[in-house]
Image: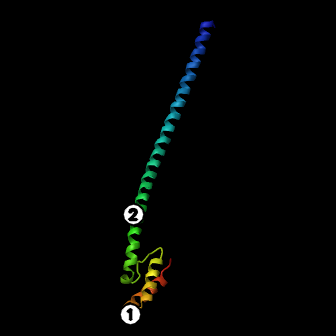
Amino acid sequence: MTANEKTLATFETRIRQMILRFQELKKENQELYGMLEKNEQAVKQLRAKLEQQQNDYNSLKMAKMMEIPMATSLAPRIGCRGLSVTSTSALQSSVTKRNKENKPWQNKRTDYISDCMSTMRI
């Protein structure tokens, strides 16, 4: 084998190695793109879920903000059903204040509110 043939064989071997390496990298690249696409879909789903959860939380927060004033003002009228007040200090102070005034027409109402407050779980 002459020097030119030896150099040509070495060159040919290197080219084949580079082609094989290119095919391996191409296959790995396709796998990575597949993983990336899968992860992007998962992120998109999680973001949609997060947005839905935030909307639900904001709706519940708004409902709770509206529920507390309504619950304190409607407690005597609705028979304590649906009353969900986080703090009964406002109701207790109004009951105490009314009991001190001793107006006979309000005693039934204050007794009813007191009964409602004693049955509530806070």
Task: Give the residue number, with chain letter if any, for mark 1.
Answer: 104
User: Which residue is situated farthest in the bottom direction here?
Assistant: 104
Mark 1, Cα crowd under 10 Å, few <14 / some 14-19 / many 20+, is: few
How far across and down, in percent of the image, does residue 83 sit?
42, 78
**Element on which disc 1 rests:** helix
For image coordinates 39% across by 63% down, the residue present is 59
Say which of marks 2 and 1 sits in front.
1
Direction from residue 21 to residue 67 in the image, left or right: left
33, above or below 21, in the image: below
Distance Cα–Cα, label 2 vs label 1: 42 Å
Between 84 and 97, the one lying in front of the other is: 97
Q: Is residue 88 visible?
A: no
Q: Quadrant of residue 91?
A: bottom left
Way the structure is coloured: rainbow
How far across and down, in percent of the image, does residue 113 sit?
43, 85
How far across and down, in percent of the image, does residue 11 sit?
58, 15
How far across and down, in percent of the image, does residue 84 sit?
44, 75
Task: Give the residue number, with chain letter if any, for mark 2.
Answer: 59
- Quarter that holds the N terminus: top right
For image coordinates 42% across by 86% down, the residue present is 98
For image coordinates 58% across by 23% down, the residue present is 17
Q: Say whether disc 2 or disc 1 marks the residue closer to the N-terminus.
A: 2
Amino acid type of disc 2?
A: Ser
Q: Are marks 2 and 1 in contact (CB under 8 Å)?
A: no
Between 37 and 11, the one lying in front of the other is: 37
- For the image, the number of numbered tags is 2
Q: Is residue 37 visible?
A: yes
**Element on which disc 2 rests:** helix
